[in-house]
Structure formats: C-alpha cells, structure tokens
Image (cartoon, rainbow, N blue to C red):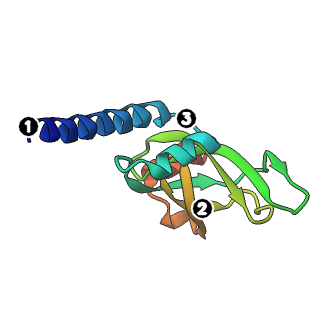
Amino acid sequence: MKKIVRAILSIGLFFLLLCGGIMLYTNRASGEVAGILDQLNPLVPNSEMYVKTQAPESVNGYGTAHYKQVAATADGQTRMIEFEGLQVLKTERFLKLTNKGAHVETYEEIAKEDVPSAALKEIDG
C-alpha cells in the first residue's frame, strides 16, 4: 500500500514540476509552441491583454493575417504575443485579447476609452 501511495505522490510531484517548468519556459515566449504548451498547462491562468493593431507580419493565400506585437495587461505588464486574424485587421485600432499565456483564444475590437490606462500607456506610443 505504501508503494502505491509513494508512486501516486511521485507522479503528482513530477507532473507539478513539469507544468511549473513549462510555465517558466513560456513566460516570455511567443509563437505556436509556446501557445500550445500554455493552452494545455493547468497552471497558466486565463487573462485579458490589449493591443493596438499594426500591419500584419504576413498574410497567407487564404487572407489569414499573422500578427506579432507587444500586448499589455490591465496593470501594464507587457509581453510579445502572436495571433491570427481571420482577415487583415484595420490598423491603429484597439483589441482586447482573451488569452491563456501565449495562446490567444479570442479577440474583439474595443474603443480607446475601454482600454485600461496602464495598458494604454504601454501600447499607444
């Protein structure tokens, strides 16, 4: 019985350490791999970030635009974020991104007045 309990605790501790290490690795990373790891990691919280749209990095043959730019949280913390737009987005607009680490789940256009002041200070420069 003790061996089974030790095995379960060892596996649990290993899983916790693995998730914590992955969270540290993806903390400042952007890109597809970081997004997938953050999406699957139970330790990464859901949050909201804000961006001011720019020209896309690239556009594929279907019109899907790839963006890579600085995003800010409501309290002004920034990180590089990558996301896909279903089309080329109008520039100089403000978006609220719903994300889990580097994984962007959704985005919506919002008015400049709806962007928290600390985030606006970081992205509207």
Marks 2,1: beta carbons within 8 A: no
Task: Report which residue position mark 1 lands on.
Answer: 2
Q: Amino acid at mark 3?
A: Ala
Q: Secondary structure at mark 3?
A: loop
- In this picture, residue 48 sits left or right of residue 14: right
- How many C-alpha atoms fall within 10 Å of the one at disc 3: few (<14), some, or many (≥20)? some
CA gap, disc 3 to disc 2?
20 Å
Disc 3 or disc 2, which is closer to the eye? 3
Q: Secondary structure at mark 1?
A: helix
Residue 14 seen anywhere in this rendered image of the structure: yes
In the drawing, what numbered circle is on residue 54?
A: none
The residue located at (61%, 60%) in the rendering is 94
- Establish if 63 lies above or below 102: below
Displayed quadrant of residue 47: bottom left
- How many C-alpha atoms fall within 10 Å of the one at disc 2: few (<14), some, or many (≥20)? many
Task: Report which residue position mark 3 lands on.
Answer: 29
- In this picture, residue 78 sits left or right of residue 70: left
Task: Report which residue position mark 2 lands on.
Answer: 95
Residue nearest the observer in this picture, 1 or 26: 1
The residue located at (8%, 42%) in the rendering is 1
Q: How many marks?
A: 3
Q: Earlier in the sequence, mark 2 or mark 1?
A: 1
Residue nearest the observer in this picture, 85 or 41: 41
Marks 1,3: beta carbons within 8 A: no
